[in-house]
Amino acid sequence: MSTMNRKTGQQQTLRFPDDPLSFHAADRDTVALKMARLMRVASLLYEAVLTGTATTKRDIFYKDAKLFKEQRVVDKIIDDMVASAGLKRADFHVCASAKGLVASRSLRIHLHSGEELSMSSGLAVLIPPAERIHRIEAVNGVSFVLIVEKDAVFNTLCGARLLEETGIGTGVMITGKGYPDLATVQFVSRLGQDYPDAIICALVDGDPHGIEILSTYTFGSQASSFSHDHMSLSLRNRLKWLGVRISELHDLGISYNSLLPLKERDAVKAMAMLRNRPDMPETWRRELCVMLHLNKKAEIEIVQGEWIDEGDVEDVGKNRLVSYIVERLKREL
């Protein structure tokens, strides 16, 4: 049985039974296990299509957790099978589990079920799967969409009421809680289509992982290069990098001595991105080179931490980060 690898596009073949003399018993057991897992997932997807029942990858995992052992096993099988069929997850009634969050003063999400999801500048809701969304309504339009890498920073900005700041218009704030899932990427893409004049920008860590997350939104996920679900979702030149950049920290009065050391895996990732991302903007490449040269990286939190000098530490830190973001948003608007 052959399936397409969603990342490379190459065919991967499982043969069972095979020549018993060609490999050891342990190898035969491994192939049998892989085949059993693949057939089990196929049967569950077939059942979902026949009954018209929506399911998630997590649901499928728990249908036979002892067989699958790990969630990532199910994830890969489903993604490869969907890519092999040249279809989308929704065609198999597989919905993305809710992960990302969205906050806004004026946004309303209307679902096909008739339910309406309301939010505020300080209260976020989970981003629903694209197939559940009927329409998105913004009472006062959308001036900007801010993607925040970390949910901890996202929650800080919600608490600081960033979206209520004057001079930046009506905004939408989103977090994919690190590397974004499909539902989050689809939601950002839809906002971009529905509100073509809105500025879309991202706040990520000044490290290789932050730039890779930026690349995922900008160019698409390399791990899903042959996935039809991810096609036409990349933002390309529409996405602006708001911060944090290693090269700007000196002008902010932040000492390089307060930065975190670059770990070996960070350096490996930076080198791989420089080598494998020929479409990466030159400014991004320079930031990666600065990281490698200094052997340092910066997290978003350093902006709110380094400028604190007196008063309530938490409140001052929030205000500093908000000021940093507002200043840069005004440059883009």
Image (tube, helix red, strand yellow):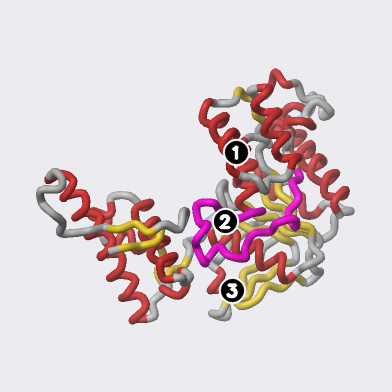
- Residue at 67 percent across and 33 percent down: it is 288
Q: Amino acid at mark 2?
A: Gly
Task: Examine the image and state in which quarter residue 285 appears.
Answer: top right
| Residue identified by numbered label 3 | 133
Give residue 168's quadrant in the image: bottom right
Up the image or down, 129 lies above or below 134; here it is above
Q: Position of residue 273 (x, y in %)?
A: 60, 40
> Which amino acid type is marked by label 3?
Ile
Magenta residues span 217-242
Observer-side mark, 3 or 1, equals 1
Q: Earlier in the sequence, mark 2 or mark 1?
A: 2
Spatial separation of the CA atoms under disc 2 and disc 3: 15 Å
Q: Amino acid at mark 1?
A: Arg
Residue indicated by mark 2: 100
Q: Secondary structure at mark 2?
A: loop
Determine whether label 3 and label 1 are within 8 Å by CB: no
Q: Residue furthest top?
A: 257
Q: For residue 75, what is the image quadrant?
A: bottom left
Read off the residue under disc 1.
275
